[in-house]
Image: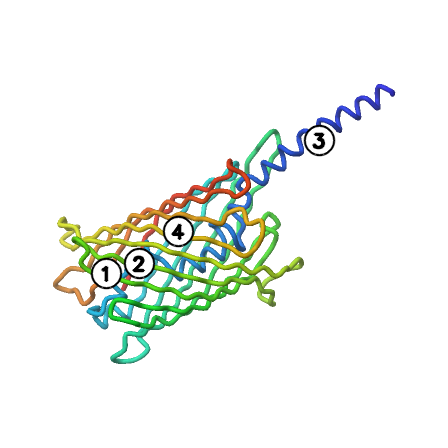
Amino acid sequence: MTRFQMTGLRLLGAAAMLMPVAAQAQIQGHQAVAPRYGSPNSMQFQATTIALDLSTIDDDRADADATPESRDADTIGGAFTYFGAGFQKGQRFEGRYQHQRRLGEGTRARLLIDLPLAVVHADKFVASGFTFTGGTAVYGTLSAGVELPVKPNWLITPRIAYSNLQAGQFFDGDGELLTASVTSRFKIAKVGRGDLTIGNMASYTRTIDTFLARQPFFSVTSNYVLRNGLAYQFPLKSRFMGRQTSIRASYVFTYTGGAQFLPYRQFHELGVNFGVRTREAEQKNGFEQMRVGLLYTHARHEFDTKSGYDAVTLTLGYRF
């Protein structure tokens, strides 16, 4: 064997040893920014979070004593998330709008329309001498549902949602998703000094392909998502600029199933939220007008213990 052949074999051996490292570096955390489904930064997670949001949306909707003014309302807000998973770090910016309107006089049934828009950025990172470029994806969801009262403190909400993704090569191009869900919200008043809300949701998601997105390598994927959680809200004795205040603590667990080889299936969300009402002299509602909160999200990787997902989200909402 010549010296040249020996050198070539050494180079091939070195490349073979480095390939698992490079592959692992790309696998670690890359799925955390997968924008279609199965990740905390996906259209699927956005659509199902809208269907059951216990951390940022006021839960007095399940209150039979809520005034007509509080049943017809609009909410605007935003959220900033910083996340990390393995080698991958990134940020998500999200703007939110929700419209709530009664279906008729004398009824508690309401039409709910949500329109969140998110921008997800995956940072560039270097691992074992390899540079992995990041990218930016934009996606939004149009969700419509009807909130139906079963009892004075129990609401059932069926929803349908369409999500659209516009992304580059780093995220494997554009995508579309349909989501059908049913949510239950049950409120137990006067638990100690506050109120307890129990939320449950089941949904079915499916990728679709229309003229609204460019998908040269489209494949049909369907999943089911289950979300269950608790929210406890109680008034504070202290006031903020003469206004009533409250604190809400929430926990939500999400499970995604159906498709094989999903890297993230189980999500834990723990939130703390501070609310401020309008002044009593001008108050015509029973809800907090402004809310500011923090949300911590954790998800373990099903195949790589080093790629667990952790994120902190700052939320802000204003209802009018």
- The amino acid pointed to by label 2 is Ile
Point 41% across, 66% down: residue: 182
- The amino acid pointed to by label 3 is Ala
Point 14% across, 48% down: residue: 238
For label 2, the SS is strand
The mark found on residue 198 in the picture is 2
Residue at image mark 3: 16
Judged left or right of residue 230, residue 85 is: right
Whether pointer 2 and pointer 3 mark residues with C-beta atoms closer than 8 Å, the reply is no
Whether pointer 3 and pointer 1 mark residues with C-beta atoms closer than 8 Å, the reply is no
| Distance between mark 2 and mark 1 Cα atoms | 8 Å
Decide which of 13, 131 is in the foreground and name it. 13
Pointer 1 local density, CA inside 10 Å: few below 14, some 14–19, many at least 20 = some
For label 4, the SS is strand
For label 1, the SS is strand
| Distance between mark 2 and mark 4 Cα atoms | 12 Å
> Is tag 1's residue or tag 4's residue first in the polypeptide sequence?
1
> Is tag 3's residue or tag 1's residue first in the polypeptide sequence?
3
